[in-house]
Structure formats: C-alpha cells, structure tokens
Image (cartoon, rainbow, N blue to C red):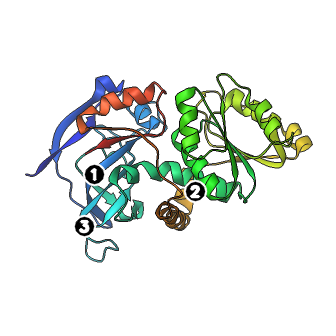
Amino acid sequence: MCTLRSWLIKENGEPNDVLRIEEVSKPTIERNQVLIEVDAVALNFFDILLCQGKYQEKPPFPFTIGAELSGKIVAINEGSKFDVGQRVIALPKLPAGGLTEYVAVDERSIYPIPKSMPSNKAASMFITYHTSYYALHHRANIQPGEILLVHAGAGGVGSAAIQLGKAAGAYVIATAGGTEKTKVCRSLGADIVIDYLTEDFVQVVKEKTDGRGADIIYDSVGGDVFDRSRKCIAFDGRILVIGFAGGTIPNAPTNHMLVKNYSVVGVHWGLFSKLNPKGVQQNHKELMKLYKEGKIDPLIYREFEFDEVVEALNLLGDRKTWGKLVVKV
C-alpha cells in the first residue's frame, strides 16, 4: 500500500497539542475528482479555529487542515477538463485538507495558473485576492479616481485590496500598526499610509481629501474601526464589511447612513462562490491577467517547511505577521 505524510487532527485543542504528522494511505480519486501532488499550502487564521473546534464548520475526526494550495495534477478521470502535469490552485474540502503530500479534489474547486507563477505565490493568492476583487468590483463598483481606504493594509485581504485598488485606478489610503507594517503598505503601492498606533486615521483622511472623505472603505476589522470609519466616509460612499478581526461586531445606525447618504455593504465571498461558480471562474481569469501584467503580486511573510506547521500557526495566532504564511510540501 502506498503511503504519504499528512497532518492529522484527532481531537480539538491548541495546534501545539492536537496536530500530528502521520502516515496515511495515498488517496484515490472518485468521479469528477483529480489527484494533486501538493507543492505549497497557505495558512489562514481559521485553520487555528478548526484545531480548537471554534470554527463554524466542524469536520469529523480525523481531519486535515489547509484550505488553499498549489500543486500539479498527477491523475484524472476519463473526460476530465484538466490534464496530467497541469499546475493549478485547489481548494480541498474538509476533512481532506491540503496539508498533505497528495490530495483528491473536486474539479469544481480547481483553477489553472500560469506556468510562470511560483508555487508559493499561487497558494497565497486565492482566498485573499478573490475576496478583495469581489468586494471592490462586484460590491463596491470601484471606479478610476475614487478614494479607497483600506484598513489593516498589511494583512492578507488588506494587501490584496491595496494592489487591486491601484490596479483599478483608485487613490489608495491604507492603515497599519507600526513601522514594519506601514512600510509593507508603501511597498504595495499605497499612496498614503497611516500608522493607527500614532495617528488618527479619520483626521488624516479628512485632511488628505479636503474634508470629502473616502469613497470606499475596506473594513476587515470591525468594532471601533467601523464606528470611526463612518466619520470619514464620503457622500455616496460605500463601507465594505469584510470581517471582524478586531473581535467586536459593530452596529450600523441607519439614521446616520440616511443623513450622510452612504451604504454599508456586506461581503460574503464564500456564499458568492457557492451560488455563482461561473462568476468565480471569470474573476479568476481577471486576476490571472492582472498577475501576468505585474499589477498584483501576493505578499508572503515567510515560507515554512512541512514539519514547521505548528510553529507557523503559533506565529499566525499572535497576529504579528503580515501577508500570507506558506508551507512548502
């Protein structure tokens, strides 16, 4: 029997306590699946929540985490639209996640990539760039010349939003905490970068826009950041609700929206991807085009070896990193 190494979780707890590398049988493919030899896996904060049993999805034990990967197709079924040897991004479904050497994935969750795209970049780009592209183009209808304020600009979705905003012709203002992260935002192309540890972003945005405010505010933080963002949103502006990394879910007073004439727009890319898979495929083509043109380039904090997954998740859990953390397989 052919075996391979895979990270398994057999009970919930902290990554240190429950993640183990074990030998498992090499998977076989079912109808509409392909077998992928995994090259790289990007880690996400929800991987930690899955270990802890705090995520909304609770897969049966044992399971393997890793929601986005890049790799090479090594086996297909007759009539497949993919080819053996083709390089792809894949979104494996739990309990069979990507932190393994080989994984079987449904063809509907596989997306081709250019031959020139490095594996680490490919693994890092799907969730963050698709979320930000959907948010800016589908939900906010971003236009050239508009002012885009991106909160937590050095994070995964924030860094993608900065690059996609610039690619769309927007004037981008980004917030980040500390010298290192503000430097990252500048390197991504942000026109103005605000260190929220020492500056008031509301005041800076108003000053830089002559009191008009930002046309689009990309908010993955929530809490007080959302409340203060309402003070610097422009007439006809759109506040994009991406998530609540700050831990507090704010309330949106409708009377304030009416008086200032702005919209609060929810961004649930996961639901969009389920309801409109053709739309996701089209967006992926647009993102690959932008990558080939050099207008987007996934931001990677650090690469880790396969046996360093626990160390990587601990670092991610401290929330002191920027961009994406990638595991080489």
Residue ID for mark 3: 85
Mark positioned earlier in the residue sequence (3 or 1)? 1
Amino acid on which disc 1 is placed: Asp
Relative side of 168 to 13, left or right: right
**Rendering coords of residue 151 (x, y %):** 64, 37
Furthest residue to the bottom? 79
**Between residues 222 and 198, which one lies in front from this camera angle?**
198
Residue drawn at x 53%, y 54% is 130
Marks 3/1: CA distance? 13 Å
Residue drawn at x 71%, y 27% is 224
- Mark 3 Cα within 10 Å, few/some/many (few <14, many 20+)? few
Residue drawn at x 71%, y 59% is 141
Q: Is residue 280 above or below residue 215?
A: below
Residue ID for mark 1: 39
The image quadrant that residue 213 belongs to is top right
Residue ID for mark 2: 272
Dot 3 falls on a residue whose secondary structure is: loop
**Rendering coords of residue 193 (x, y %):** 65, 36
Marks 3/2: CA distance? 30 Å
CB-based contact (under 8 Å), mark 1 and mark 2 = no
Dot 2 falls on a residue whose secondary structure is: helix
Amino acid on which disc 2 is placed: Phe
Relative side of 80 to 213, left or right: left
